[in-house]
Image (cartoon, rainbow, N blue to C red):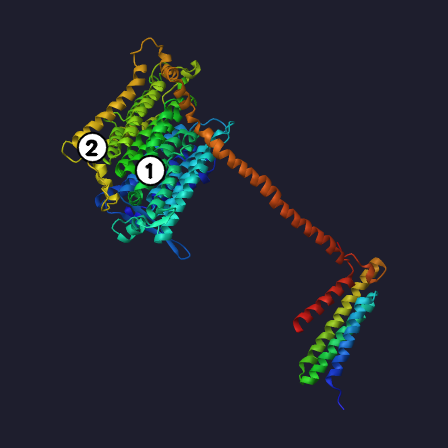
């Protein structure tokens, strides 16, 4: 029995929603990062599913790009958080409120 | 050389630009070279063109410089040389050039704070020449209108030339001239646009083609305000002319314009600019002939202005003011002539007047120069000993203005009055003749007060008295020759002894439209003409004799220095009320001030303080207040918290998706 593509997409949507909720609700910067990774992978999953459905390799190709960018982004993001931590001794996102009037 | 017609206005324009860019610290010699050279070159070109044109006259010559296009409207920048613009061209370039030469001497040593204004003066003066030449050479209304506005601008600039004076009079006079002219300009514009809307063109020769039956018929159609097209346009153009040519009710700016330097008065307010109105009326004489009622109005306004201004000139004590009112009065004569249909006589008087009035103003300038700025004729007198050249030339100018026989003014004034009589307007003839009497009176009163009797100024001033340098006296001499001789171009029939010597009339005749049913040339019986001439000559001589007696030795009991003022004192003693009314110039300025200026000022203040200050400003304040309020609330959304911003981002994406896909 083959798994219908709808299931993959539903799973991807669920992962994306969980990731979004994580980004919006978590206070810890690292956790937010993880949530972002979750969202990215949700997107990857839907890419792969569509690739299979449409019998095209382009979707899988894009996934590799997304993975590469995600890795780079994680590296930069972690570096930023380390820098912030050194300055402020915390990575609590609620206490980073300098971007205001 | 006719192909270079466009250069004639362009050269003074270029020299104006160069002079203006030289800056106030430029050496005077450089300024003089450029600023006098430009008009000089224009004069040479004009003379060359006229020489060539004389061979092919009266056929009009048109030269198109380029097509000046705006959208679908095509109006060429084109120049027209016909007998009328040829006369104007000669007057403007010739008189203009000599006034430039004169100004080199007159404006050479201005006291502080104008010691560096030499270059500014000449830049304006050259610009004026360019504008005036554009006005008279344009072959359509629009080109002329550019010049028309240009002379208005230069007039403003030059009247307000001494804008740093403590009394603030010159800038005010400049503004007055500009605003009063603007009233006329508005009417002129309406007339011009009406013609364009009806005919789709602005070219003089095309619109005012008497042979074009369709046009003549179109002019007869009812147009607006219960007037025919011809009457409506003629009225508009005439209102424009009253502004520029200082006629009732818009003459008030001209006497005030004497606040400018004297050569300006000579050039702009006597010889050229103020003649623009007369020029435009004669240029469009076809519609004035078709609009009998408006022509009658023109004649009546002209006659009224002539008389009214002449009476005001009787008692003025400012040398230049007397001449200013006499200019208004003489312009009235020109309109009288144009109104009764004697168009060539109007231009003839314009021609002679340009010479003798420029001469008189320059003579006045020479006197003022010698007296170190004094303009009150009560403090002059006896100057003939100190300024002989000025005296002789001023004498010639006064005689021409008074219309004494053999001087130029006599011929032109006689032609106007004969024209008025010939067209059946004996009443207007009467006013003209009376004005001739008054003119002779005030011109000889002026002459006597200034040059005869004894000197009434201070001892210090007497020691300072000196004849002007050659750069000023030579133009005086040349213009005096013109004031003497210009009249001989138009010798009336009775004095021609069988030959036809009225060359001026013949030269201009082709410009006057000939309509069937309108007799443009009226003929007088020889005996009537002699009689009329005799009557006006008698009146002129009488007018000249009254002040003449005072300054001759016929009244030995007066002290020499008292003679001039005795004339005024006698007038004031025997006719105190009349004298007062005239002395205060009928309080016209005061009446205008009360009836027009102050209500307007109050209206402006209402608009300024209430409409602008409260209504408009208030509306803007409310707007800014609301914006500020919205901002005060809106800024709570910018918490500075990254997660809030992310939330907005997601919400935005959701809304966007909703909007795009659902």
Q: Residue furthest top?
A: B557
Q: Residue B298 shows which numbered tag?
A: 1
Q: Is residue B25 visible?
A: no
| Residue at which label 2 appears | B492
At a point 28% along the width and 33% down the height, the residue shown is B349
At a point 28% along the width and 18% down the height, the residue shown is B545
Image quarter of the C terminus of chain B:
bottom right
Label 2 secondary element: loop
Q: Residue furthest left?
A: B498
Instruction: Pick whichever, B276 or B129, lies toward us.
Output: B276
Crowdedness near tag 1: few (<14), some (14–19) or many (≥20) residues, C-alpha within 10 Å:
many
Relative vertical location of residue B321 with respect to residue B633 in this rendering, above or below: above
Instruction: Pick whichever, B373 or A87, lies toward us.
Output: B373
Left or right: residue A38 compared with residue B594: right
Instruction: Pick whichever, B186 or A53, lies toward us.
Output: B186
Q: Chain of mark 1?
A: B
Residue B352 in the image, given as x and y percentages of width and height:
28, 32
The quarter of the picture where residue A43 lies is bottom right
Label 1 secondary element: helix
The quarter of the picture where residue B97 lies is top left
The quarter of the picture where residue B234 lies is top left
Residue B579 in the image, given as x and y percentages of width and height:
39, 20
Q: Chain of mark 2?
A: B
Left or right: residue A48 compared with residue B472: right
């Amino acid at each position: 029995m083959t798994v219908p593509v709808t299931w993959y997409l539903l799973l991807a949507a669920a992962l994306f929603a969980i990731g979004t909720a994580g980004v919006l609700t978590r206070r810890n910067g690292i956790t937010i990062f993880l949530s972002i990774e979750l969202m990215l992978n949700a997107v990857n999953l839907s890419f792969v599913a569509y690739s299979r459905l449409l019998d095209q390799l382009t979707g899988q190709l894009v996934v590799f790009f997304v993975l590469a960018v995600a890795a780079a982004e994680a590296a930069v993001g972690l570096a930023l958080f380390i820098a912030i931590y050194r300055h402020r001794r915390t990575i609590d996102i609620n206490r980073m409120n300098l971007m205001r009037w | 050389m006719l192909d270079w017609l466009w250069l004639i206005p362009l050269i003074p324009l270029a020299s104006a630009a160069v002079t203006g860019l030289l800056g106030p610290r430029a050496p005077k010699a450089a300024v003089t070279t450029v600023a006098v050279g430009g008009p000089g070159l224009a004069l040479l070109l004009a003379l060359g063109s006229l020489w060539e044109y004389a061979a092919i006259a009266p056929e009009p010559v048109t030269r198109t410089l380029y097509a000046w296009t705006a959208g679908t409207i095509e109006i060429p920048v084109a120049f027209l040389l016909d007998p009328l613009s040829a006369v104007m061209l000669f007057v403007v370039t010739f008189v203009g050039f000599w006034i430039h030469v004169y100004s080199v001497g007159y404006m050479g040593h201005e006291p502080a704070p104008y010691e560096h204004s030499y270059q500014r003066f000449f830049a304006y003066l050259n610009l004026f020449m360019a504008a005036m030449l554009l006005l008279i050479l344009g072959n359509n209304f629009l080109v002329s209108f550019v010049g028309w506005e240009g002379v208005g601008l230069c007039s403003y600039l030059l009247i307000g030339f001494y804008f740093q004076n403590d009394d603030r009079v010159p800038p005010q006079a400049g503004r007055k001239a500009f605003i009063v002219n603007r009233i006329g300009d508005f009417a002129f514009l309406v007339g011009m646009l009406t013609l364009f809307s009806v005919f789709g063109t602005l070219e003089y020769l095309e619109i005012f083609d008497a042979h074009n039956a369709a046009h003549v018929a179109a002019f007869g159609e009812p147009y607006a305000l219960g007037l025919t097209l011809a009457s409506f346009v003629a009225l508009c153009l005439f209102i424009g002319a009253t502004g520029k040519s200082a006629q009732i009710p818009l003459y008030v700016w001209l006497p005030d314009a004497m606040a400018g330097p004297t050569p300006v008065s000579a050039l702009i307010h006597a010889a050229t600019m103020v003649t623009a109105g007369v020029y435009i009326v004669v240029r469009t004489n076809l519609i004035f002939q078709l609009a009998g009622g408006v022509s009658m109005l023109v004649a009546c306004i002209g006659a009224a202005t002539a008389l009214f201004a002449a009476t005001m000139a009787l008692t003025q004590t400012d040398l230049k003011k007397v001449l200013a009112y006499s200019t208004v009065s003489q312009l009235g004569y020109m309109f009288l002539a144009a109104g009764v249909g004697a168009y060539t006589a109007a231009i003839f008087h314009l021609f002679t007047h340009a010479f003798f009035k420029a001469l008189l103003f320059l003579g006045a300038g020479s006197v003022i120069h010698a007296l170190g700025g004094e303009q009150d004729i009560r403090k002059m007198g006896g100057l003939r000993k100190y300024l002989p050249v000025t005296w002789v030339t001023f004498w010639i100018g006064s005689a021409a203005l008074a219309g004494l026989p053999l001087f130029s003014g006599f011929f032109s004034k006689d032609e106007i009055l004969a024209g008025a009589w010939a067209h059946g307007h004996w009443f207007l003839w009467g006013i003209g003749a009376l004005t001739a009497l008054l003119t002779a009176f005030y011109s000889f009163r002026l002459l006597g007060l200034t040059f005869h009797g004894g000197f009434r100024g201070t001892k210090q001033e007497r020691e300072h008295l000196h004849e002007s340098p050659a750069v000023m006296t030579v133009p005086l001499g040349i213009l005096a020759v013109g004031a003497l001789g210009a009249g001989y171009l138009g010798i009336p029939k009775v004095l021609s002894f069988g030959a036809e010597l009225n060359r001026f009339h013949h030269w201009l005749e082709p410009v006057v439209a000939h309509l069937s049913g309108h007799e443009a040339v009226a003929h007088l019986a020889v005996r009537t003409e002699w009689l009329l001439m005799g009557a006006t000559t008698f009146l002129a001589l009488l007018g000249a004799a009254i002040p003449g007696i005072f300054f001759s030795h016929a009244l030995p009991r007066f002290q020499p220095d008292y003679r001039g003022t005795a004339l005024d004192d006698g007038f004031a003693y025997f006719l105190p009320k009349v004298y007062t009314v005239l002395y205060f110039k009928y309080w016209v300025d005061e009446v205008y001030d009360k009836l027009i200026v102050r209500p307007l000022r109050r209206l402006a203040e209402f608009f300024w303080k209430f409409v602008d200050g409260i209504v408009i400003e208030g509306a803007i304040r409310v707007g800014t207040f609301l914006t500020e309020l919205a901002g005060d609330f809106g800024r709570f959304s910018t918490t500075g918290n990254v997660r809030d911003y992310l939330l907005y981002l997601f919400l935005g994406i959701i809304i966007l998706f909703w909007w795009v896909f659902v």
